[in-house]
Every structure is written in C-alpha cells, then in structure tokens.
Image: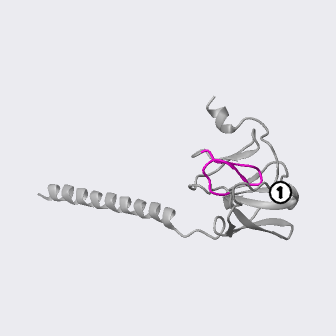
Amino acid sequence: MSESTDRRTFLVSAWKAGLAFLAAAGIWTSWDVLRPRLAAGFGARVKTVSPDAVPTDSVLEVFEARAYLTKVNDEIVAFSEICSHLGCRVPFCQSSGQFECPCHGSVFNRAGDHLTGPAPRGMDRFAVEIEDGIVVIDTNTMVDGPPPGTVTVDEPSLGPACSEESHG
C-alpha cells in the first residue's frame, strides 16, 4: 500500500507542477502583451532625422510614429499612414511616386492631396517641430487633411501604380 500511495503522491505532485508551470506561462505571456509601454511611439513625440535627411522628391517612413516625412514647398510635413477613408495603412508607391491605399483604391500625391478614390479628404498630418537639429513628430497633434480638389504640388505620376504591378 505504501508503494501505491507514493505513486499517487508523485502523480498528484506532477499534475500540480504542470498546472503551476502552465499558469506561470499564461501570466508571463499576458504580461508581455498587456504591460504598459513607454511613451515612445504613436501617441508621443517621436524624434526622427535631421531636416537635411528629409527627401524633397520621395518620402521617408517613420515606423515609430506610423508616419511619413517629406518636404513640400520647402516645408517639412509628416503624414499619418492611416487612410482618411476607413483607416487602412496607405503605403507609398516608389514607382508612381504616390500614396496608394490597397483597401479601396484612394490615391494621394506626395503632398498628401486626395487625387482619386472614396477618401473624404487628403492625408491627415501630424505637427512637426525642429528640436536640437532633429525633426520631431508630435503624434498627439493631428490635423485633418485638405479637402478633395486641393493641389499643393502638381506632380504627375512617375510611372505605373503599385497596384497595377501586383495585378499584372
């Protein structure tokens, strides 16, 4: 009888240890996902590059701010990468030199002006400041994009749209 009690005690202890391990793994995973993040990214002030590094004929993607930087008429501008239509991420197409929303087909020029598609306005902008020789994007301060028909820069498409390249 002593042998079966030892076996039973061992199995109960093994189950308890396994469940404790599973609970610890669940807590670890949940904490990793739910822990508060430091204020460095969207919803904060994001330091980027020097003003000289901001392109005048293309855009620079700033992942931490979920934004794009470019110069429009010698002014540094930061655009939200979120479409003003339904919130899809709008990538910049290098071949056309335009922003092209893959969800519903809205197209914006390099200055964020609405060109075509269902978007109700141009691309929204973030406030930009130069601090200690670095461009800082304030992702807490967003300004609605310009209304359709606004032409800040008159730049025709440079080539084929990215959506055309991917569909043949």
Quarter the N terminus occupies? bottom left
Q: Which of 125/121 is in front?
A: 121
Q: Which of 160/147 is in front?
A: 147
Q: Is residue 94 above or below residue 141?
A: above
Residue 55 rendering spot, x and y as whole percentages: 84, 52
Q: Which of 112/137 is in front?
A: 112
Asked which quadrant contains residue 63, the reply is bottom right
Q: Residue at 40% of width from left, 61% of height from top?
A: 26
Q: Is residue 6 above or below residue 104?
A: below
Here the colouring is one colour
The type of residue carrying mark 1 is Val
Q: Is residue 39 above or below residue 102?
A: below
Is residue 33 one of those drawn in magenta?
A: no
Residue 35 rendering spot, x and y as whole percentages: 52, 68
Residue 17 rendering spot, x and y as whole percentages: 32, 60
What stretch of residues is rendered in magenta?
Answer: 105-121
Query: Image check: 31 left or right of 5?
Result: right
